[in-house]
Image (spheres, grey):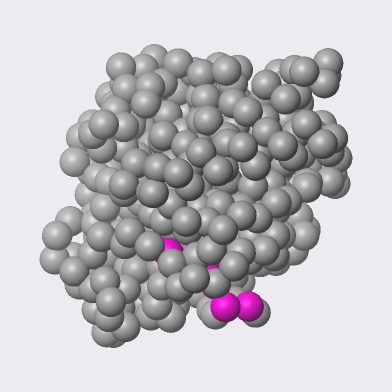
Amino acid sequence: MQTSLVAAIRSAVEQAFQTGRVSGIIVAVARRDAAPSTWSFGVDAAGVPLTPETVVPVASITKLATALVVLHLVDCGAVALDEPLGRYVPDASAARITIRSLLCHTSGLPLDLPEGRARYGPGLDWPALRAAALATDLEAPPGKRVQYSNVGYSLLAALVERQTGMEFAKALQRLVLQPLQVEAWLGQEPARPPARLAGVRSEHTGTALEPYNSPFWRSLALPYGGLLTTAEGALRLARAYFDQPGGLLSAALRGEAVADQTNGLGGGMAPPLLWPVCPWGLGPELRDAKAPHWAPAQASPASFGHAGASGCVAWVDPEHSLSWAILGTTTADNGWLVRSGPAIAAALLASLGQQGD
């Protein structure tokens, strides 16, 4: 990476720090099929300095990894995208929805489990969450809107378990993380103490149950949001849909995975992250013209990736042959990711243009 690119990253990160909304940021960048370069700035919520090797909870970037497991099974012929879930998981209440609709969030399932279905507290584990997801039915007709769904990705993890005979966390390691050489953990404590996050909004903040920051939360092995990895690891997961060396997926399926699957439907997550048109692929979100957004307006409409509520984003812009991951030490709840994430990425794109590539 040339000096101008490093300077652009540093300047944009320093501006993010000046807002007072985030105290630490790690940025990983890769051009074309080159190995990523990573820089770290600031400290986590406990005042521990960040390094390029710092492990961070990446929340819904986990969905990129979960989708890769499913797509790997599609490539192997074990799963068909347009078959109903019930072919593989007959005991699911939402058995009639397709695998494709689960991957692109058009299934009609709710964002999260219905209230009271699986109480967050001691005794909760992935099997209990899986059972609750299996018992959850649709809240809207399939194919009528984009409703981002953690429940849907829990059902995809159940599908993986039925097809592989392995616990989802183990299947994820064997089928995706190891082949992609991603250093990551799901459902177990990482090899290094993870960064502590600020801005966790929960009744359990400051307790042994605090989301992101507690061994209890990390033990849940959430297939929609529980992964811990480095900035390079997050970037590798996004690049697996594009140019990852030794690619995990066939070229045809990679292309389909980053093509719009929602056919002009509107929707999204929850206000203000709802859009009149909400393109989504088979796992990755597509940039298009969404606003507000964590990828800059300068990114190509066909760029793709995923963000996480823990304060992170991993993104690929094929048009500019650039990919980036931005991991912060404050959750996205205070808006820093939507404010500063695009500015950091825009600085990267501008620097790239100045270098004539």
Estimate the x, y position of residue 140 in percent, counting from the top left.
20, 35
Residue 125 is covered by the magenta coloring = no
Magenta: main secondary structure: loop
Q: Judge whether residue 129 can be spotted in this image.
A: yes
- 225 versus 244 height, above or below: below
Query: To which quarter of the image does residue 71 belong?
Result: top right
Name the residue: 48% across, 47% down. Answer: 17
Q: Between 81 and 102, which is closer to the camera in this rendering?
A: 102
Quadrant where the N terminus lies?
A: top right
Residue depicted at 38% across the width and 22% down the height? 291
Span highlighted in magenta in the image: 192-197
Q: Is residue 315 visible?
A: no
Q: Residue at x 45, y 16 (%)?
A: 289
Q: Where residue 288 sits: x, y (%)?
A: 49, 18
Q: Nearer the viewer, residue 323 or 124?
A: 323
* Residue at 42% in and 29% down: 293
* Viewer-side residue, 290 vs 225: 290
The x, y position of residue 16, in whole percent, is 48, 42
For residue 301, which quarter of the picture? top right
226 sits left or right of 265 in the view: right
Q: Is residue 23 left or right of residue 50?
A: left
The x, y position of residue 158, in whole percent, is 45, 61
Asked whether, in this view, residue 156 is left or right of residue 173, the answer is: left
